[in-house]
Structure formats: structure tokens, C-alpha cells
Amino acid sequence: MTTPTASTVPTRIPPLRLVALHTRFNMLETVRIPIAVIGNLLFPSLAMVFFVVPNPAVAGEPAVATAAVGQLALFSVMSAFLFTFGTGVAEDRALPFDAYVRTLAAGAGPRLAGRVLTGLLFALTSLVPLLVLGRLLTEARADAGTLVLGVGAVLGAGLPFLMLGLAIGYRLSSKAAIAVVQLVLFPLAFAGGLFLPPEMFPGWLAGASEWLPSRAGRDLVVETVTGVAAYPLALAVLVGWGVVFTVLALLAYRRDEGRRFH
Amino acid sequence: MQTIVSVRGARRTFGEVVALDGVDLEVGEGELVGLLGPNGAGKTTLLSLIAGLRRPDSGTVRIFGADPRLPATRLRLGTTPQQTGLPPTLKVGEVVDFVAGHYPDPMSREEALARFDLTDLVGRQTGGLSGGQQRRLAVALSLVGRPRLVLLDEPTTGLDVESRRALWQALRDYHADGATILLTSHYLEEVEALAERVVVIGAGRVLVDGALADVLSQVRVRRVSLRTPVPADRLAALPGVTEVETDGESHRLLTTDSDALVTALVRADVPFRALEVSGVSLEEAFLALTGATTTQEVAA
């Protein structure tokens, strides 16, 4: 065995290998808690079976059904992001192992990248049953190109919620984070037209909801998969909220470093 | 000898609490240093600065001549998670592989586990391990990357005597390869068994820093109780007295040299009766070193 001395400068581990290492670690941790996986996969599909499939005015009309699948897909990704990054980060922060991992020779980059990749993978897997059900039980249709664009749009529209999740996760205790995530997720999803399309909203709500990130994201996704144009400000509203949530996430992350001690 | 750890004038506060109040510490290559002190003395905060977990409010902290907050500096650093801190759903082998993946030339999974007698537990989830097994795994994780500097925060707390001795031997073996080790402990026995040099921290400062034998003689404070009409301030002037507790004619003195104290009592012809000499706890000894007077408030 060769014994390196303190004066030999060790070679760095390639960043991509560290990202893979942390992704694997995060995936293993998540997969071992089956309820987290099942809940994530199940809820949007259940919403599809209960609200979309039995309603012929939605399920039977290709454009409406396709929009409905898009809405629920966004809900699914939003929920995966808020839970993985909101409650997930808050729970991890409470574990002494998190402080230990920060003493290993990986910066914040690989740790965060591993977490984000895990979140993306789970968000993508949650889309699979939803798309299968949409294809089999409704008239929702999209060609391969539109499908790829649609998945991209859903993930892109989900990014502000990823940042919101991080802001919650780094700012709050795990108990508070669970409550806040649920408090944020369902009203935002409903008012954003992810369960019922905004055309069914009363006039005041349809107008007000155009300022919400969920509504802006929903309309952009629907535009991608059905061609129905989003309202003019949708992209600006989505990006605006994205910037706000990113700043909140950064502030929460910085504050976290200074606060914890024992 | 190359300097591995260099802490200069480190000060760290948490709100109103001053955790470290100007600490200086230099540790050279291959040293095995024990960090002693009561709870709340600042040991853990000092280790967290050296591990790059937080930065000092003022002063500098360097390991291998560089800032420990940079990930590349920590390639040669090994630390332990706290006992309760292992991810419960992960298997022993998976945790070892995860940590090993951060180092350029780690031990094999087999070697790391064998050093701490954990080979049979490789497929067990860490949540199902006993407290002692978790503790051994935690220390194994600190060594798996073959670090040249190892920080151990109370490595054997909660272990039975036998596992504690086995763990000490594993640490001595690793130190024999030339590694530098800095460990904190509540147990004088542990520091005696491992350390060559001892640093005592109290109230955020370095109180004593010296060779094991020298420090032990200072920490081995004894209590001398007696009844005498002589005023307390005269007793306080006796050799090595750090603390006087008075209740009427009853006096309890803490002294670093009970032999000299008793000799002086007799030589000065002080009238006394009910003389008793007894040992004190490590906490009391620390308090005596901090110069705290008659307070009985001892950190548990």
C-alpha cells in the first residue's frame, strides 16, 4: 500500500462523477421510502381517472382532453418538485448526516445537481402513468414531436416551483415545510386551472389567475400541446415568478448556513 | 514538520453566545491531539471551523495551508457523522461507497469494514444497526478516503468498554500510518489512551496546551476538605488552590497539588481537623482551570 504524505496534492474527483454519486445516493434514499414514490405516481393519475375520464365533454374531445392531460402533467411535476425540494430538503437539513456530507470534498454544486436530477427523474416517472391513461382512456392525442415538446414545456414550467420548493426547504423546519407545501400546492394548482380549465372559472378568478405562475405555466403547456395560444403575458409572469423564487431560494440557502450550529 | 491545522485568533459567535473567543491552535503532521473541555466549551464549534462547515467571524483557519471551506482542500480530510446521523434506509455498504466516491484513492469497501469489524453487516440498513455498530461505521467513514487529517467528535460516546478499546486500537493503527488526528472527548481515559498532546478548551478559549503528562497533572485536581477557624482568604493563598467554598468553619478547597497544600497547612501551623483529600470529576477540573470561582453550575 502506498501511503500518501500530506504534501502530495491529491487529484480532484471529476465533477460529473460527483453528480452521479449524489444522484445515486438521493435516488436510493427516495426509492427506499415506497410511499413517497407511490404517492407521487398515484395522485395525478387518480385525478385523471376521477375528474377527466368520466366526463365525456372533456375525455371525448381531443383538444380538451389533450389540454386536460397537459394540466395534470404540470400539476404532477409541480407536486413532485414542491415535495422533493420543499419537504425533502427540510427533512435532510434536520439530519446530522447532511452536515457530515458538507464536510466531504464536494461543493454545493454536485449536491444540488444530484438533488435536482433526482427530482427531474421522479417528475418524469410520474408523467408515465398519466400519459398512458390519457392515451388509453381519453381522446387526448399528440404526435411524437409534440409529446417531446410538451414534456419539455411541463418541466420548464415546473422550474419556478422547483425554486419555490428549495426556498421552503432551506427556510423552514420539516414539519412547517410539509404544511406550507400543501398550503401552496393545492390552491395554486386549482387557481391556476390545473384541475378545472380556466374557461370554467368565474370572470374575476379567470382574470386574477393570469398573475399566478401555475396559470401562466398551464397556458404555455396547453399552447405547446394543442396550439391554443396562451395569454400575452404568460411567459413574462412565469419568468417573473421564477426570478422571485430563485432569489428567495438563494436567500434561504445563505441564511441556513449561518443559522445552524450545535 | 509540516503544519496540518492552523487556527489563528478564531472567534465565532452565535447571536449573543460567544462560542470561540480568539482560539490559536497549530497541529503538525502526524500528531494525535486530544481536545478536552466541558460541554459548551467550543470544541464542536472549533472542529466545525476546521472541517469547513462554517467560517470564523474573525481570525483564520487553514488545513494543509488552504481554506477548508474550499471542497478541494477537504480531499485529505476525514470526519464522522454524529451517531444518530446515518441515513436509516441506506445499507452499510452503500454508505461506505458513497463516502469513498469523494476521494481519489479510497480504501476498498472490504478494508474499511474489516478495520472496524463490520464486514458481516455490509448488507444491513444503517437504521437497523445497534448504537455501537453505528458508532463504528461512523468512524469507519472518517477513514475510508485515507485522509491525512481526521477529525473525530467524541468517537466512542455511548460505547461499552470492549468496543471502545477495539475502536481505539483501530485509530492507533491508522495513526501509525502517519495520519494526523484531532479528537474531542468527554473522557479523560480516552484522551489518555490515544493522545500525545492535549488541548483544554473552556469558555471559548485555549486554557492549556501541552504534552499529555503535563496536562494530566493540571487536570488531576483534588479536593481538600477541612474544618478550621482560619479565614478563607488565607486558605486561598495556599499552594495550587483554584477555588474555595466556605460554610462557617467548613472549607472545601480545589487544588492542583494536594500534597504541597497539606504540607503547607502543617508547616504554617494552621489548626485544622476532619481533613479529607478526594478526587474531582473532569468537569470540576475544567472549571478549576477556567478560574471560575465558587459556582456549582457544571455543564452536564
Image (spheres, helix red, strand yellow):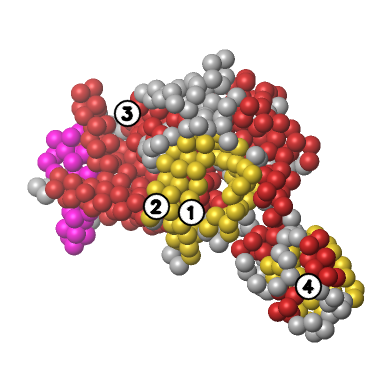
Name the chain letter of the residue that bears numbered label 3. Answer: A
Pick the front one: B120 or A214:
B120
Q: Secondary structure at mark 4?
A: strand
Give percent across and percent down for residue A87.
44, 48
The residue under the point 70% across, 34% down is: B167
Kind of residue at disc 2: Gly
* Dot 1 and dot 3 within a common chain: no
Q: Secondary structure at mark 1?
A: strand
Quarter of the rendering containing residue B295: bottom right
Give percent across and percent down for residue B224.
81, 67
Residue where numbered disc 3 is placed: A135
Residue where numbered disc 1 is placed: B23
Q: Main secondary structure of the magenta part?
A: helix
Kind of residue at disc 1: Val
Span of residues in magenta = A202-230
The residue under the point 19% across, 44% down is: A219
Label 1 crowd bin: few (<14), some (14–19), many (20+), radius 10 Å: many
Kind of residue at disc 3: Arg
